[in-house]
Image (cartoon, rainbow, N blue to C red):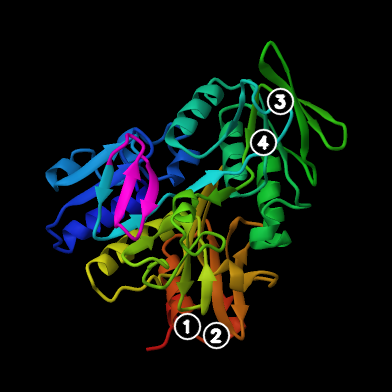
Amino acid sequence: MGGLAGATAARTLRTEGYAGAVTLLAAEARTPYIRPPLSKEFLLGKADEASVEVVPADWYHENDVELLLGTPATRLDPGGHTVALADGRRLPYSKLLIATGARPRRIPLPGADLDGVMTFRTFEDSLQLRAGLAGGGRKVVMVGSGWIGMELAAAACTYGNEVTLLGLEDIPLSAAIGPELGTFFRQLHEDQGVSFRLPASAASIEGRSGRATAVLTDSGETLPADVVIIAVGVAPDTALAETAGLALRNGILVDAGLNTSAPDVLAAGDAANAFHPFTGGHQRSEHWANALNGGKVAAKTMMGQDAVLDAVPYFYTDQFTVGMEYSGYPSLAAGMEPVIRGSMEDGSFIAFWLSQERVVAGMSVNQRRVQKPIKALISQRVAVDVRRLTDPDVSLEELLPG
């Protein structure tokens, strides 16, 4: 299917020497693209359209990959090895990869259908939001205090808009990185003028002449709004897998090689809940690195190679003056207090989460070229001395064996 995982799988098939027919179905009428810049540099006008493409548009033709844009799959028949398309066609397959991604969660709010109210997921969403924010001077209400909500709030504020953010947590991002680090990001935003209402939720959206004018919160406060963005997470798009009778649990269940419960059918990216050798359990990741690595593994598995999705998970965020990178396993870090290397007050530090003296996650803030050794510490399960780990005078490479 036509996102990062699907396009990466097609590219990997060709680079690994597969010479057979490859067809890539894309629900959107746009060549496959990378999502992270949509809420960051592309939204801010710092990157152009070509920079977000997985591969240049002419790559598909040059590499004999049939790209069917605006043509989603509607039904899968594992027994007959066929897939039905929205245009009525039915295609046979020898191997099939489901990479249908995820869809934004929606809140059944009164007024959610008014003009000026939007969710955020696609390239078109980013274009629409940039057009609404770029002139500045708008009142923006952000519903959602996760990574996407915080990134969009930062972009809206950078454009010179008045931003108010609602979230169900007492501290933004605390479910992901804990209260201490969540407070760091909240202070960053407040220093730039973002206002928070936490914990709070939207009760309804008010409007006039068909357009949103305000958000009414559950506490009864009325927040004037020209733009309302609902960013409360995503749900895996498993409709195709469900109708085909594939095993599901928080996504499409797959093994470490990304095989589903049906022969010759694989799944990767946001929709897949993959078994991970490091944790010994299944985990679903919504970050781009998972889609990138999953596309590669799926292609190699389809070719009969012994491939396993075992890369350390990774994602990044850019908000105002802060660039953050995170490698590791949030499920293993959950509930743990991080240890800090560097100065949170100076805005340059690394946070580590440890289990049994081993690093399971590491988050660097405004520090360059440290993610490679952080991933090595995690993947090699290195037992560390916390005093040395948090000492900036000890390089991370020194902590690695050999």
Ranked by sequence position, the earlier of labels 2 and 4 is 4
* 125 in magenta: no
Residue 395 shows in the view: no
Q: Secondary structure at mark 2?
A: loop
Q: Which residue is mark 1?
A: 399
Residue at the location (50% across, 23% down)?
A: 131
- Comparing marks 3 and 1, which lies closer to the viewer? 3
Range of the magenta residues? Answer: 72-89
- Comparing marks 1 and 4, which lies closer to the viewer? 4
Q: Position of residue 120 (x, y in %)?
A: 54, 37
Q: Secondary structure at mark 4?
A: strand
- In the displayed structure image, the side of residue 86 where residue 206 appears, left or right: right
Residue at the location (64% across, 61% down)?
A: 177
Q: Position of residue 16 (x, y in %)?
A: 18, 64
Q: Which residue is mark 4?
A: 142
Image disc number at residue 138: none
**Three-letter amino acid code at disc 3?**
Gly
